[in-house]
Amino acid sequence: MARILAIDYGTVKIGLAATDPLQIIVSGMDTIPNAELIPFLKNYLAKEAVEKIVLGYPTHADGQPTMLVPKIEKLALQLTKHFSNIEVVFHDESLTSKHAREIILVTHKKKKRRDKKLVDKVSAILILQDYLKHY
């Protein structure tokens, strides 16, 4: 089996998480600047087998897509172009940033809680865990 990778997209930075090769355990990978995503993935995919990329798909409480959705859909096209052998899917990421902040508040010391990059990485973990639970 190959890994599944999750992306929590942001206009400035992107949180990343991946499963182990057996797709049982989800681990946070990194938070990187948006502009570095494709080079980062090319490097990572040269070393690791990934069968699917899960993109967080943000919606409002009424189910309507947020203003980030067009950018996420554009990213999906770029990923499909660069990595044609990897399936790209969307998964609802409603409230993941809020839940990530709550988790960080409970599990990390005050100094670490100020690390804004941590929220993106934890959000990617939550997206991937939820995806695995539903598929």
Image (cartoon, rainbow, N blue to C red):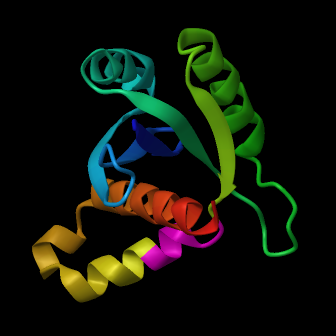
10 lies left or right of 58: left
Give the x, y percent position of residue 30: 27, 44
- The answer to which quarter of the image holds residue 112 is bottom left
**Bounds of the magenta segment:** 94-99
Q: Is residue 81 above or below residue 19?
A: above
Q: Position of residue 132 (x, y in %)?
A: 53, 61
Q: Quadrant of the N terminus?
A: top left
- The answer to whether 54 is drawn above or below residue 38 in the figure is below
Residue 67 lies in magenta, yes or no? no
Tell me the chief SS of the magenta region.
helix
Q: Which of the pair 56/13 is nearer the observer? A: 56
Residue found 29% across the figure and 15% down from its top: 46
**Residue 21 on image: x %, y %:** 32, 43
Q: Nearer the viewer, residue 4 or 70?
A: 4
The quarter of the picture where the C terminus appears is bottom right
Left or right of 115 on screen, residue 19: right
Query: In terms of image quadrants, where is residue 123?
Result: bottom left
